[in-house]
Amino acid sequence: MNLTRSRLHPTLRAWAAAAALCAAAGCGAPHGPATPTGVTVPYSAHGSPGSAPVQPIDFRHDIHAGKNQIPCLYCHYYADRSPVANVPAVSVCMNCHKFVNGSTPEFEQQIEVLRGYAARGEPVPWISVYRLPDHAYFNHKRHVRAGLPCQACHGPVETMPRIYQYASLKMGWCVRCHKANLRNVRFASSIDCYTCHR
Ligand code: HEC
Ligand code: HEC
Ligand code: HEC
Ligand code: HEC
Ligand code: HEC
C-alpha cells in the first residue's frame, strides 16, 4: 500500500527514550526536552494499563499506525481542528478494507465483523478509553497546534496492540504541564481554574 509515511518526531523519540531511562533509574528530573515549538513536556504521564477495555473489533494501532505508518490524523482528523478528537466512522475503515484482507484467518474474521457493520450501516460501538468528568474542559486543537505530539499524552500508541489509558488524566497531571509552560513565549498556558472549569 502507498501510505503517507509518518515518523515519530526525533525530539519526541529523544524524550520517550529519556523518559524510559528516567523511569528505570528513578531519576527525579522534572522536565523532558521541549517540543519543536518550545512547549515543555514534564515527565508526568503514568501508564495505567488496567484501563484497556476489550473492543468490539480487535483494532490494532500497532498494525495501522506502527507497521503500516498510517498517520494518526488520517483517522482522528478532528484532533487538530476541534476541541474533541473523533474516532473514525466505518466508512473510513472501508476506504482500505473494501480491498485489504487480514493476514491470518483470525484477523480476516475480524475484518468480516467490520464489513458486517458496514453492510448494515451501523456504527461500531467502540468503548471510550479517555474520558474526563463533565466539569473539566479540554481542547485538542489548542494542544495539537501548540506542537504537542499525541504521544505526549496518549503514550506510544503506534506500539499498542490494544489501546490503554496512558496518562492519569488527574488535575495534577494537567496542572503540572501548564505550570511548566506558564511563561512559554508562543504558547503560554494558564493555571486559572476557569481555564479548565467553565
Ligand atoms: C489506510 C488504510 C487502512 C485503514 C483506513 C484501515 N485499515 Fe485496517 N488494515 C490496513 C492494513 C494495511 C492492514 C494489514 C493487513 C495485512 O497485514 O494483511 C490492516 C489490518 C486490519 C485488521 C486485521 C489485522 C491484520 O494484521 O490482518 C483489522 C481487524 C483491521 N485492519 C480493522 C480496521 C478498522 C476497524 C479500521 C477503521 C477504524 C481500519 N482497519 C482502517 C489498512 C487500513
Ligand atoms: C486506521 C485508523 C486509525 C489510526 C491510523 C489511528 N487510530 Fe486511534 N483509534 C482508531 C479507532 C478505530 C479507535 C477506537 C478503537 C480502539 O480504541 O482501539 C481509536 C482509538 C484511539 C484512542 C482512544 C479513544 C477513546 O475513545 O478514548 C486514542 C487516544 C487514539 N486512538 C490515538 C491514536 C494515535 C495517537 C494515533 C497515531 C499514533 C492513532 N490513534 C492512529 C483508529 C485509528
Ligand atoms: C495535552 C494532552 C493531549 C494531546 C497532546 C492529545 N490528546 Fe487526545 N485526549 C486527551 C484528553 C485529556 C482526552 C479526554 C478528553 C475528554 O474527555 O474531554 C483525549 C481524548 C482523545 C480521544 C477520544 C475522543 C475525545 O476527544 O474525547 C481521541 C480519539 C484522541 N484523544 C486522540 C488524539 C490524537 C490523535 C492526538 C494527536 C493528534 C491527541 N489525541 C493529542 C489529551 C491529549
Ligand atoms: C504536556 C503539556 C500539557 C498537558 C499534559 C495539558 N496541557 Fe493544556 N495546554 C498546554 C499548553 C502549552 C497550552 C497553551 C496552548 C496555546 O497557548 O495555544 C494549553 C492550553 C490549554 C487550554 C486552552 C485554554 C483556552 O483558553 O482555551 C485548555 C482548556 C487546557 N489546556 C486544558 C487542559 C486539561 C484539562 C488538561 C488535562 C486533562 C491539559 N490541558 C493537559 C499544555 C498541556
Ligand atoms: C489545567 C487544567 C486544570 C486547572 C487549571 C484546574 N483544574 Fe481542577 N480539575 C481538572 C481536571 C482534569 C479534573 C478532573 C480530574 C480529577 O478529578 O483530578 C479536575 C478536578 C477538580 C475538582 C474535583 C476533584 C474531585 O475529587 O472530584 C475540583 C474541586 C477542582 N478541579 C478544582 C479546581 C480549582 C479550585 C482550580 C483553580 C485553583 C482548578 N481546579 C484548576 C483540571 C484543572
Image (cartoon, rainbow, N blue to C red):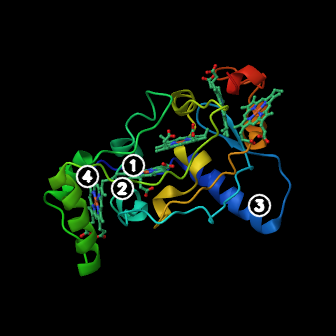
Disc 3, disc 2: CB below 8 Å? no
Q: Quadrant of the C terminus?
A: top right
Give residue 69's mark: 2
Mark whose residue sits in front, 4 or 2: 4
**Residues packed near mark 4 inside 10 Å, few (<14), some (14 to 19) or many (20 plus):** some
**Relative to residue 188, is residue 156 depicted above or below?**
below
Q: What is the distance, in whole Å, between disc 4 and disc 3 at their CAs? A: 38 Å
> Mark 2 or mark 4, which is nearer the start of the sequence?
2
Q: Quick check: is the Cβ at mark 4 less than 8 Å away from ligand 1?
A: yes
Identify the residue position indicated by label 4 in the image.
93
Q: Which residue does the image show at 58% across and 45% down from the upper left?
A: 131
Q: Is residue 30 left or right of residue 89?
A: right
| Quarter of the picture holding the N terminus | bottom left
> What number is the disc on residue 6?
1
- Label 2 SS: loop
Q: Which residue is mark 3?
A: 22
| Residue 153 pos. (x, y %) | 61, 46
Along the polypeptide, which appears first: circle 1 or circle 2?
1
Quadrant housing residue 66 = bottom left
